[in-house]
Image (tube, rainbow, N blue to C red):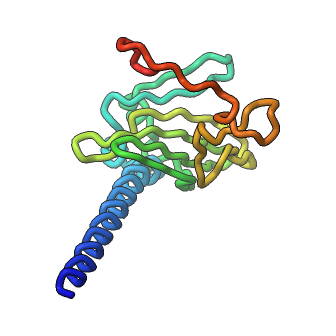
Amino acid sequence: MKFNKFLLALIALIGISVNTFAQSEDEAIKETLNNYLEGGSVGDTARLNRAFFAFANLRNLGKDGKISEMPVKKFIAAVPVGGAKWSSKIVSYSYAGTAATAVTEEELSTFKFVDFLNLLKINGEWKIVSRVYSRVDKNVAIAASNPGGGFSTASAIAPGKGNVPANTTKKPATKPKPSDDGW
């Protein structure tokens, strides 16, 4: 009887610890994203600096079809006094281990930015390490292939095979060579 009570208490403690860890990770990621979104909106360069890794890069595709790249230091230095005056939201984020990805929107008077952000947990703090963004009309919606979920390559549908899972038609994988890193 004592063992059962002990075991139940231990399970409850583990459950609380796991939930607290997930909540603290969620809160830490949201704090980083909000430092970016709110810092940019009001021109708070200290908050922007807290959000980004010092050597982060921002990239987009210019009107000329070429990739434009800007170091984060140049981006932060260009923030207007008083901020960009955008309204913003976190559309989604996900994480595993020390890596995360997020989608945000920043709406201005005549257009909006859609950001695809990559984050890493560096020395215990989440930092944006890259921003790939697009300037779009305000009415453009974000398209997602499988919002809120994921899929396993083992259950992917084989092209041209109807609803037959791909793994039922494949030959067994060959054993990698010792020098093969799996890529």
Residue at coordinates 55% horizontally, 51% vertically from top-left? 86
Residue at coordinates 64% horizontally, 36% vertically from top-left? 135
Q: Nearer the viewer, residue 174 or 10?
A: 174
Residue at coordinates 58% horizontally, 42% vertically from top-left? 152
Q: Nearer the viewer, residue 134 or 164?
A: 164
What percent of the width, then of the height, locates residue 167?
Answer: 64, 35
75 left or right, relative to 97 = right
**Residue 87: quadrant of the picture:** bottom right
In the rendered view, tell whether residue 168 sits above or below residue 70: below
What percent of the width, then of the height, locates residue 115?
Answer: 55, 41
In the rendered view, tell whether residue 60 sits above or below residue 126: above
What percent of the width, then of the height, locates residue 75?
Answer: 43, 32
Q: Nearer the viewer, residue 64 or 59?
A: 59
Residue at coordinates 47% horizontally, 43% vertically from top-left? 101
Tell how many labels. Answer: 0
The residue most toward the left is 2
105 left or right, relative to 182 = right
- Image quadrant containing the N terminus: bottom left
What percent of the width, then of the height, locates residue 12?
Answer: 29, 76
**Residue 53: quadrant of the picture:** top left
